[in-house]
Amino acid sequence: MHTLGKLMHCYAKQKELDQLDGVVETAIDGVKFYRASHSSPRQPLVYQSGIIIMGQGDKKVYLNTREFSYGPGDYLVLGVPLPLECEAFSHNDLPIYGIAIDIDQQLLLQLTNKLHNHLPQPTSSAHSECGLISERMDHGFQNTCERLLQALLKDTEAEILGRSIVMELIYRILMGPKGQVLFDLAKYDSHYARIAKALSLVHQDYAKPLTIDNLAASASMSVSAFHRAFRQVTLESPLQYLKKVRLNKAKDLIAVEGRRVNDAAHQVGYTSLSQFSREFKRHFNTTPKRATN
């Protein structure tokens, strides 16, 4: 078993999470623990921005036509929230373990400002980067992850050292081979940061009649420049992205909160129930009514 898997197994035992199927908060703000008992088939989900570290089991995520595989020894970084398709694989009937870490904007700005004083200023690439990166852990990154999990096993260490260890993880990503994504996210005038701002509007106001003009204005970009940068970051068009966010939210309303199909459709911004049902079935390969089962 991978060292991170052993530590996550100890955490699940200590916190009595042996039967968990889902995600729970930990004692360190912005750090969540994930456990699943079994493999799961490919299905659409919206991943929030953050860092994902697997301890046991493997996952594949699909962003439009691109595929990313990760497991113990890898890390995944989402600079922005993204609608993905995900499948998970357990091995030898063992549970799947992972942790998800929020990227705190204040921490990120604090680190990039300090690095600006010590390193030549990184220059943004001519094109915005995709909002999802995966990378193999080096020794320093894995060591930091192990110390984060060890801190979670001791409440005092979690409270006193947790934030500084999270800061170190973000630092190691910034200094890694694909750290430019987070550097660009911290620059308010970069195309990447502007698209991130527009995505925040989508996730806040998805039920409203948002248009490309609205979103481009929120990013302070022309419509053509916005459309091009949006597709580079998300690998989706703005309207496709908005549709996937609405459909995933509707599924949660129906399957988790028990809302009626027509109520869920209305709450996420659909005015036509037939259009909602058609797009829901195309996206999830099942009808809204069957999503309640």
Image (cartoon, grey):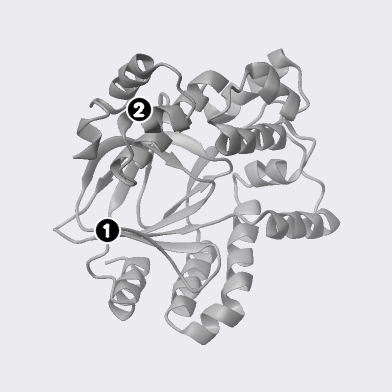
Specify the amino acid type for callout 1: Asp
The residue at 30%/35% (across/down) is: 43
Residue 127 percent coordinates (x, y): 68, 26
Residue at image point 50% right, 72% down: 148
Q: Amino acid at mark 2?
A: Asn
Quarter occupied by residue 45: top left
Name above or below for residue 144 compared with residue 155. above
Tell me the number on the disc at residue 146.
none
| Mark 1: few/some/many CA within 10 Å (<14, 14-19, 20+) | some
Q: Which corner quadrant holds the C terminus?
A: top left
In the image, is 224 to the left or to the right of 129?
A: right
159 to the left or right of 85: right
Q: Nearer the viewer, mark 1 or mark 2?
A: 2
Farthest right residue? 117
Q: Give the residue pinned by disc 2.
A: 262
- 187 or 214: which is nearer to us? 214
Residue 282, visible in the rendered structure: yes
Query: How many numbered callouts?
Result: 2
Q: Position of residue 178 (x, y in %)?
A: 59, 44
Q: Is residue 26 above or below residue 275?
A: below
Q: Nearer the viewer, residue 133 or 208?
A: 208
Reading the image, the residue beneath label 1 is: 21
